[in-house]
Amino acid sequence: MKTSFATSIVRFFFASLFLTIAVKSGIPAELFSSTIPTKVLAAANSLPDPIQYPQYTSKSGGWLFFAPDTWTSGFFPATLYALNTRKSLCGATTENGLGIADWKTLARSTSAGLIPLETDPGERKNIQHDVGFISFPFAEELEINSKKPDISAVVAINNFAKALAARFNPTVGCTRSWDTKDTNDFQVIVDNMMNLEVLFLSAHLTNNKSLSDMAISHADTTMKNHIRPDGSMWHVIEYDATTGAVTKKRTAQGYSDSSAWSRGQAWGVYGFSNMYKHTNEDKYLETARRLATFFLDNIPESGVIPWDFGAPVEDRPPDSSAATVVANGLLMLSKYETDTHLAKQWSNAAIDILDKVTKQAWSPSWQSLLSQGTVNMPQKNSLTGTVYGDYYYVRAGNELLQMALAQCS
Ligand SMILES: *[C@@H]1O[C@H](CO)[C@@H](O)[C@H](O)[C@H]1NC(C)=O
């Protein structure tokens, strides 16, 4: 076929324009690379029998597996669901590698190992309030067909919500996080903001408003007590279970009681953006903005997000999972933000964080997608891959596609 010179010029112009846009947008190509499905399928094929789930890697990048009764067990099946979503958004091509598995079937079979946790408190003695995190794959399953939801996913969401609701104390106004020997010592961690979703989902499925009221009460109490005037957050607030009074404000996973643990701050950004999504209450939007502003203002010049913003530079490993969690929080904030200028600012910040964490932590020779995660620094567990860091990386890619901020491949 003969192509005229003019047509070639026009084609060249559009090709360059496209390249310029792709480069300018700063969206890392790795976010949509075939390496993702390849690694995730390899991990799915290597799950132990009876089932255990990957949580973090060794310092050389090999997954370590943990019993279902671990707070992180939902993230791997949820990642399989995220690839199912991506396949429905992008189709399967040689380039994106999404055709190598039936992600939905794999996600369902992998989630099945979580079912015994639903109704047997003995099976879930270690996860306590983390029933919220554990429910993520079932929340993803509900999204596949919201008109005719899969009944086992509905049952799972309702069971996990019921388990979380049983941890609610109306005097404190929160669901209890960690169990303590002294039952009057009622501890609430910022991570718990992520667990409220299961209460909203179940409230919707069962028309039981008391569940969403608990979520709202938990968020309001957290808003009142967990946030410092500068917009940073304490990790743990301890309450007197009888009077509801605050007895202690401290850290567990951070550097000090007065510093800001970055993943906790990221949970907060996501959690309050999610509250705004569910309620349309301005106070949650304002809170999410404050938490996001603190996070963004405290990222060091290098762009590498440290495990704790207040830790001394010589004792400050990065946490790539804080980066991917906050990217999802910022994208959700951007989606529901009422000020269009700010909305752009949040999504640009999310893209910038994803770009930098990719340059810093994308590790082709590791089994995880990213390295440089900090699981628990006080326990000296850092510089690993993390299953949640990877999950939120994949999910951020999907979110960018759904918000039309990125294109497939
Ligand atoms: C709503 O949920 C709460 C918490 O699980 C429970 O105590 C209550 O019985 C439920 N109400 C109905 C009508 O099922």
Image (spheres, helix red, strand yellow):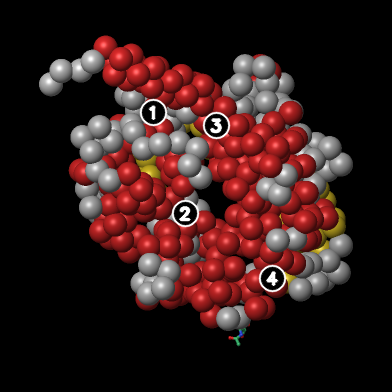
Q: How many marks?
A: 4
Label 1 belongs to which residue?
Answer: 30
Q: Are marks 1 and 2 in contact (CB under 8 Å)?
A: no
Q: Nearer the viewer, mark 3 or mark 2?
A: 3
Q: Would the CB of label 4 be found within 8 Å of ligand 1?
A: yes
Label 3 belongs to which residue?
Answer: 351
Residue at x 46% of width, y 62% of height: 139
Q: Looking at the picture, how far across and down is residue 306, in whole percent?
A: 63, 27
Sequence order check, earlier mark of 1 and 4: 1
Label 2 belongs to which residue?
Answer: 70
Sequence order check, earlier mark of 4 and 3: 4
Q: Amino acid at mark 1?
A: Glu
Relative horizontal placement of residue 43, taking residue 392 as reference (left or right): left
Res. 214 mark: 4
Q: Amino acid at mark 2?
A: Thr
Q: Looking at the picture, how far across and down is residue 250, in whole percent?
A: 77, 45
Q: Amino acid at mark 4?
A: Met
- State the CA–CA distance, disc 3 to disc 2: 31 Å
Q: Amino acid at mark 3?
A: Ile
Q: Tag 2, which secondary structure?
A: loop
Q: Tag 4, which secondary structure?
A: helix
